[in-house]
Image (cartoon, coloured by chain):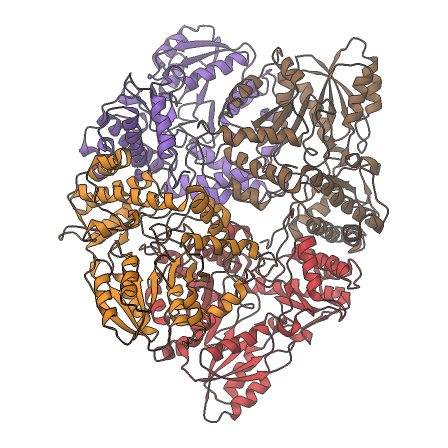
Chain colours: A orange, B red, C brown, D purple
Amino acid sequence: MRTGQTPLFIPGPTNVPDVVRQAMNVAQQDMRAPDFGDLTKPIFDDLRTVLRTETATIMLFPGSGTGAWEAAITNVLNPGDKVLMARHGQFSGLWVEMAQRLGLEVEVVDVPWGTPCPAKEFARRLGADRHGDIKAVFVTHNETATGVTSDVAAVRRALDECFHDALLFVDGVSSIASIDFRMDDWGVDLAVTGSQKGLMCPAGLGILAVSARAMEMSETSSMRRAYFEFKDMVATNATGHFPFTPPTALFHGLRVALDRLLRQEGLDAALARHQRLSEGVRRAVAAWGLDTVAEHPSFASNTVTAIRVPADVDAREVIRIAYEDFGASFGSGLGQLAGKVFRIGHLGDLNEGMCLTGIAIAEMAMQRAGVPVPMGAGVAAAQRYYTLGDGAFEQTGLHLAAE
Amino acid sequence: MRTGQTPLFIPGPTNVPDVVRQAMNVAQQDMRAPDFGDLTKPIFDDLRTVLRTETATIMLFPGSGTGAWEAAITNVLNPGDKVLMARHGQFSGLWVEMAQRLGLEVEVVDVPWGTPCPAKEFARRLGADRHGDIKAVFVTHNETATGVTSDVAAVRRALDECFHDALLFVDGVSSIASIDFRMDDWGVDLAVTGSQKGLMCPAGLGILAVSARAMEMSETSSMRRAYFEFKDMVATNATGHFPFTPPTALFHGLRVALDRLLRQEGLDAALARHQRLSEGVRRAVAAWGLDTVAEHPSFASNTVTAIRVPADVDAREVIRIAYEDFGASFGSGLGQLAGKVFRIGHLGDLNEGMCLTGIAIAEMAMQRAGVPVPMGAGVAAAQRYYTLGDGAFEQTGLHLAAE
Amino acid sequence: MRTGQTPLFIPGPTNVPDVVRQAMNVAQQDMRAPDFGDLTKPIFDDLRTVLRTETATIMLFPGSGTGAWEAAITNVLNPGDKVLMARHGQFSGLWVEMAQRLGLEVEVVDVPWGTPCPAKEFARRLGADRHGDIKAVFVTHNETATGVTSDVAAVRRALDECFHDALLFVDGVSSIASIDFRMDDWGVDLAVTGSQKGLMCPAGLGILAVSARAMEMSETSSMRRAYFEFKDMVATNATGHFPFTPPTALFHGLRVALDRLLRQEGLDAALARHQRLSEGVRRAVAAWGLDTVAEHPSFASNTVTAIRVPADVDAREVIRIAYEDFGASFGSGLGQLAGKVFRIGHLGDLNEGMCLTGIAIAEMAMQRAGVPVPMGAGVAAAQRYYTLGDGAFEQTGLHLAAE
Amino acid sequence: MRTGQTPLFIPGPTNVPDVVRQAMNVAQQDMRAPDFGDLTKPIFDDLRTVLRTETATIMLFPGSGTGAWEAAITNVLNPGDKVLMARHGQFSGLWVEMAQRLGLEVEVVDVPWGTPCPAKEFARRLGADRHGDIKAVFVTHNETATGVTSDVAAVRRALDECFHDALLFVDGVSSIASIDFRMDDWGVDLAVTGSQKGLMCPAGLGILAVSARAMEMSETSSMRRAYFEFKDMVATNATGHFPFTPPTALFHGLRVALDRLLRQEGLDAALARHQRLSEGVRRAVAAWGLDTVAEHPSFASNTVTAIRVPADVDAREVIRIAYEDFGASFGSGLGQLAGKVFRIGHLGDLNEGMCLTGIAIAEMAMQRAGVPVPMGAGVAAAQRYYTLGDGAFEQTGLHLAAE
């Protein structure tokens, strides 16, 4: 039996604040009541603020972020449409696979896992696409499998510079609310996230923000769809209602989580906190003498760090020991990184103590798994950063979010 | 401000038992942990028991019952397949619409709202389908909009008698766990329900049970799908995991709800309770001198009663007053019944006192809305039935469930 | 196994609103933290508002109302002090017994159960007390065992008219926040209540309000005490702290309950609601042809109604059946009323539907226990009052609270 | 605004396990229901198991441990009785003061704070008490203010060796369920604890275990008491009921906490865990080069460690910084230790990660307060112990509990 409580160190679902858990412990309610929109409509507004958009249409699909991906594709594109995507980690790879399954022609750019979306190569291909065959460009803002953040603004610049009018789809599942995301500034047409990451709620809602242009295109899209149909959602959302029974408790959770994010901590402060807390984790990794999967600090993610263990150790052992001996969950290496890395999620409702807990447990688990890291070394590096700030050491990265 | 608490009288979501709410108030957990299946796999088993099937594959899709409908169609059928469906209420009508949207050729049998699925007409059409063009027959077991329960076994007999091998799809959203449902006995191939009705949990999971034959057909189905792909679900479910982040708190809720249903109350006792409690509601309606939408007591639903108000009264007024003045939610008339009926849901975690509360509030709301029902008359009729049983009055119906 | 949920119909603990339950589901916290007073001090202020006092000192003793009674006596009086008390029900009787145990000389005035505190007889005795031997007069504002509300203002007038300076102690456990209570206007010196009645929280706090004069007298009181020592409480309360570990979750509950009472519903509206809801219950009793223990409607309580069953029926049977068959808890007859009455509590977070539920269940239980009440008769009488108001019938009482 | 969650590091109230919090989120219930004893009586039994007694009477007083102290004294002793007590910390001092307030003649043995109850001096005084004037000996099993555990068995031997029949009172508030306590073996007559320490529940119950001899003496004790009267409690407890409204939610919490302690973890395992986790904390303190208040490791407490900071630093600064900057609560120095020590509570529902979190935060707070401890040093020492066990370093203490 496990005693005590241990925060989650996976990159989602994240630790739900107590006030959010309290708020979700509600009786079921009539989702067709006339005043139901008093609950839901301000949530749409607040999500626009989180995504820094004034005009996008927000939709909440009962389901997961994966469902929201499907909604984005099937409502806006057409069978056989060509789309440009990079594959540089497990989740960008799964997105490619979904696009293919749903009947798109995917032009895949494979780059090494550990690097970001190749904006320059995208620029080259968009420039070469004289006939505008590419209907959409997909960017994984934060590749959760590798801990790499991509430069969405650079992709927007690439589109603009060659006057390409492809839609810009962004997977912001593990970035939005934790890493700076600017839907309007970056001209994002479809942004996808979920309730269970930076928004600090349980899983259960796939969240979609759709630009006016994409909404317009959805009217003529000929892909088959039913559950994820925008029209039904938009029509019922007009009064704050839904086309089918939504998970109302989650709305109460979102209500409190958004108040916390936007009105108590403040979005900018939350982004800065993610930068600061994650920097402590990176300093710990440096102190361990281990490498991150992210090949350069400039694109190391503020929400998840993927850590390579020495070649003679199976990272799954580290994860198993952390879970069995210390009740802590770390993320595992996915796909080609299986057994080679473990990942520390550091997003959502987090503070210094929680990060240090994760680092300390990682050290003990590595010790038992045979990774020769000195006990307390990573903790001390993070503590120094948390108490002394930048002066403590050289900073490990310069972040997009901080620019 | 409303004081006090009032049960829900809509036909779903239903009132969640306190122990289920307690169980769902959990911290987020690692859905990829090795022991995660200890939580989920027994839920699959228990759901099989609830659906009275030994062999069906159970799948839980984060989403709603509507999503489960889509999963059923897109995984098993093929574009252009012909299906036989009846339209006799709002929900059977929506199902027809979804089938059409997803590219099926729907042979629709329209029958009056208030009557069940026309098993004889189905038999006739199946008999006439010499070339086996009909690939599937869809039955809405309980039409939530009209309060009518259909005889699924009769449709199975119709199929068997003409040796037709169409698949049998059943919408059991508002019947399963509350009205007798026998997947194996009735040879159901795809049964759909949700977490928020008879299963006494919040909304958030579309539940699907798939026969071995339908599973086999899903391997060659050529409909496009991604989120609802059976293969991904089945592959990850093998170890109790999921292809994307599931709403784990709901699993904890289901765990307790299923224990309650199967091990504390007992499924048969729960079905009998629904029969008994709903009979009280029907006697109240009879005492009011009002008609149910269900045209004959033999197919009146044990989970919802749709009540016609006099022609000079707008049923929406009854509903509005009940909500505003007494904090009670009744179901509204949908589609062609809008303004003509209000519905009392009587399913899930319910008892005599709760039914009487709903009846008493309905009487007060009708009084204020101008429906001339004598105060207390319905309450008294239900009370007599609840205390004296059948002897109190003539029974209003003979139920399928009780056969 | 019981299904569904049934409100409590005992006169405390009362039904806790969902928002209060949510608020109490908190992690433990440091009760010595510097900002702990931010939680507790506004609660003291709000309780003063509830008791309509500007100057009284509020104290919250972890324990029960009984503990607060002891605190009141041992801090302010001296061994052997003479006090004047009426005995007209179980709780006033227990208070007499406590006073005697703690070493006071109690001048007891026994009056019939079902009548209020005899203000005129008190006036006579106070007038006859030429040497001021009576140090305190104790009044049970609402005798929970009989459903009788006493006129505290009349006792104050009795004291004033004979210029007697005895302290005025009031047991407001089942009245405060539900029946008009005016500490300053009535010159109450010590008022006692608990968290679990009109304040809509769980049991766990004995609440005491102490006038400036009583606080002064506590400085020289020579009764032995330790746990209930005012000095320790007042000294630590100055910064919002406590002399021992308090039940912090209850403070969070009180916070929300007080906001609800004072800022959402409003105290006057809450008192009026208790008057209105209880009147419905009394009309039901009248429709049953049964008597209340309260001998005259002018002092029938707005928080609890004690109902006499016919002599040939054991009221305990009614209570047993209601509990076993219908999951409802009514209050039992206490002391000399055992077996003769059952009590319906109607205080705290309550609405029309809940009262009707209780009345309907009482009818079914009485039916089964052999009390010949017509089914639905009480429900109908209450429904008429709740929808039509005073015009429906003659009102059953004129209440102190409404004066 | 504070983000994230941080365990409590005060020595009570302790961190309540999630399952206990879940269990307490219940509706109010009828505490006079016939089946109420089904909830409460097994709790009495389990508490006997926790206290390792077969015959003691268990009583649960709504209130705090302080209240239980008062109940112990006022029910069993008589005014003017002489009792023998040691004063070696804030809490033993408060107990002396209470005994004096309640009218006992206290023979106080003052010994340095940081030493345990002086069993030899007690033996000397008991031996000298030829006339048996000493009616009771009071031992503070674990002095929460100093982090010192006393040897109750040695005091029992002292009593036995001089054939003295004084009663043995033990304050086990911060030891019971966490440090080995053997009521029957040690011949303890009155043991006192609370719900909010090793029992992992919120505050709200003072818990008392009373030997048969003490129960007998309570029948003739002449101290005044009412709320804390054993007779009322015992009489109503016979059927599992209470003389006044108890905090029923806490009983549900205790139910789950006791199951966890006795049936899931096991009492011996829980004691061993406290020994192991606290040893990690002591090794951290040693690595910091700081002293504990406990003057010798052989009586260092397994539930709380009081740490002396250098003379030029105010320990209150460490505590303030930990709270304000890192959201962590440590215990402060009390009485003569104010400003000189901070305390880390390590009892209840705790694990390695939580201890390391506390140590890491203490290091950061000390750093900012000017205590020159090397970052990560304490963490590393504890990590080594938690992963490598005794071999890592010399053990800092040999514990009574482990003997």
Up/down of C389 relative to B365, above or below: above
Up/down of B314 relative to D243, above or below: below
Residue B237: % across, % down:
35, 64
Locate residue C86: give its quadrant: top right
Give the tally of numbered discs: 0
Tell me if I can see residue C202 in this picture: yes
Q: Nearer the viewer, residue A341 or C130?
A: A341
Q: Quadrant of the C terminus of chain D?
A: top left
**Left or right, A127 with reference to A209:** left
Residue C43: % across, % down:
57, 31
**Left or right, D243 with reference to C116:** left
Locate residue A135: give its quadrant: bottom left
**Left or right, C118 with reference to A109:** right
Q: Nearer the viewer, residue B280 or B245?
A: B245
* Residue closest to the far left: A312
Residue D157: % across, % down:
37, 17
Residue B374: % across, % down:
80, 61
Residue at horizontal 41%, vertical 67%?
A213
